[in-house]
């Protein structure tokens, strides 16, 4: 998704707000290791250790996507698609649809 956005002139950043005590497998350090093992994170990846950013945005799930237009207005909030754990099972792509709609005006 990052490449899809970057190729369309849309900035992209990931923020890890996971509680590493409750979800050690999703800690910032482990996610960086996953990126180094071929997951291809070619975008800024930040750590929200206190979960303050996630709370301020009202994030409820991992991952959750927030799409802002050029006026910094929130135009989409939600999931990327209907099958986050199994790319072969995707039947809807809500985030891609929202990006297409935003770019179309």
Image (cartoon, rainbow, N blue to C red):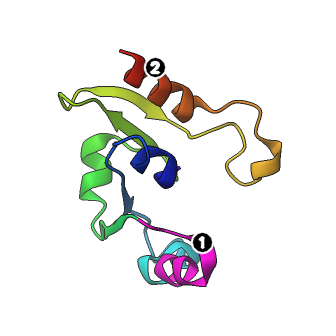
Tag 2, which secondary structure?
helix
Q: Which mark is residue 39?
A: 1
Q: For the point 53% across and 72% down, which residue is it?
A: 26
Q: Residue 99 is drawn in which quadrant? A: top left
Task: For residue 60, say whether it is visible.
Answer: no
Q: Mostly what secondary structure, the magenta segment?
A: helix
Q: Position of residue 77 (x, y in %)?
A: 42, 32
Q: Position of residue 61 (x, y in %)?
A: 51, 47
In the image, is 27 to the left or to the right of 91? left
Q: Which residue in the protein does label 2 denote?
A: 101
Q: Which of marks 1 and 2 is nearer the N terminus?
A: 1
Residue range of the region highlighted in magenta in the rendering: 30-42
Q: For the point 64% across and 38% down, which residue is it?
A: 81
Image quadrant containing the C terminus: top left
Tag 1, which secondary structure?
helix
In the image, is 69 to the left or to the right of 40? left
Q: For the point 28% across and 29% down, which residue is it?
A: 69
């Amino acid at each position: 998704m990052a490449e899809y956005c970057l190729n369309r002139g849309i900035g992209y950043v990931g923020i890890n707000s996971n509680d590493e005590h409750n979800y050690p497998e999703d800690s910032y350090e482990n996610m960086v290791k996953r990126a180094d093992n071929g997951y291809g994170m070619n975008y800024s990846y930040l750590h929200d250790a206190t979960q303050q950013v996630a709370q301020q945005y009202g994030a409820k799930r991992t991952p959750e996507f927030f799409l802002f237009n050029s006026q910094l207005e929130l135009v989409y909030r939600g999931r990327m698609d209907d099958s986050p754990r199994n790319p072969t099972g995707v039947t809807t792509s809500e985030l891609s649809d929202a990006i297409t709609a935003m770019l179309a005006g």
